[in-house]
Image (cartoon, helix red, strand yellow):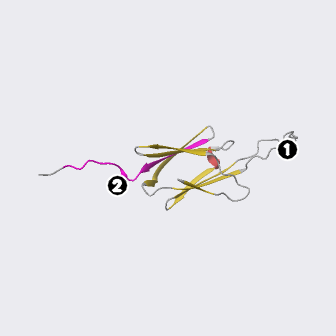
Amino acid sequence: MTKTTSTPNTYTPQYSTVRHDKGVIVNIDLPGVSKEDVTITSEKQQLHVTATRKSHTPDSWTLLNQVERPNAYLLKLNVHKDLDLSKAAAQFNNGVLSLNITKRQQSLPRQINITD
């Protein structure tokens, strides 16, 4: 998988991939984001993950550390043609989005029997 750059003022989240014999699991870190604010789409062999983070700081507070925190995330991944995005499954737990993308049936290993 290859990463596509994000647009200005939007951050590319950290992610990792784990390959297994039936496909790939992509874990994407989205701290401060709720499940309802995540959108996952695919087009051809490209996966798009967008997420928005809401500010939890009350207006009456004055922050001592004005560290810039991401308000939005965008990740675009080009997925290998052997992977089937139409059968991808997603889970979101504690700020981590996990996508399980399986291989296409014709890409899986199979045994060929010898006929007489």
User: Can you give x and y, in whole percent of width and height, for residue 39 in the image?
Assistant: 60, 52
Q: Is 62 placed left or right of 80 in the picture?
A: right
Asked if residue 14 is positioned above or below residue 2 in the image, the reply reads above
Q: Is 105 placed left or right of 13 in the picture?
A: left
Residue at 70% of width from left, 54% of height from top? 10
Asked if residue 61 is positioned above or below residue 2 in the image, the reply reads above
Nearer the observer, disc 1 or disc 2?
A: 2
User: Can you give x and y, in whole percent of width and height, for residue 111 in the image?
Assistant: 26, 47
What residue does disc 2 label? 106
N-term-proximal mark, 1 vs 2: 1
Specify the farthest residue to the left.
Answer: 116
Q: Residues within 10 Å of mark 2 (few under 14, many from 20)?
A: few
Check if residue 59 falls in the magenta segment.
Answer: no
User: Can you give x and y, in whole percent of width and height, for residue 17 in the image?
Assistant: 53, 45
**Amino acid bearing label 1:** Asp
Q: Residues within 10 Å of mark 1 (few under 14, many from 20)?
A: few
What residue does disc 1 label? 59
Residue at 72% of width from left, 59% of height from top? 8
Check if residue 103 falls in the magenta segment.
Answer: yes
Please provide the residue range marked out in magenta.
Answer: 96-113
User: What element does badge 1 sit on?
Assistant: loop
Q: Is 58 placed left or right of 23 in the picture?
A: right
**Amino acid bearing label 2:** Gln
23 or 87, which lies in front? 23
9 or 3, which lies in front? 3
Give the tally of numbered discs: 2
Q: CA distance from mark 1 to mark 2?
A: 55 Å
Specify the farthest residue to the bottom.
Answer: 44
User: What element does badge 2 sit on?
Assistant: helix
Q: Could you say which quadrant of the image residue 56 lies in?
A: top right
Residue at 35% of width from left, 50% of height from top? 108
User: Can you give x and y, in whole percent of width and height, for residue 71 in the image?
Assistant: 73, 50
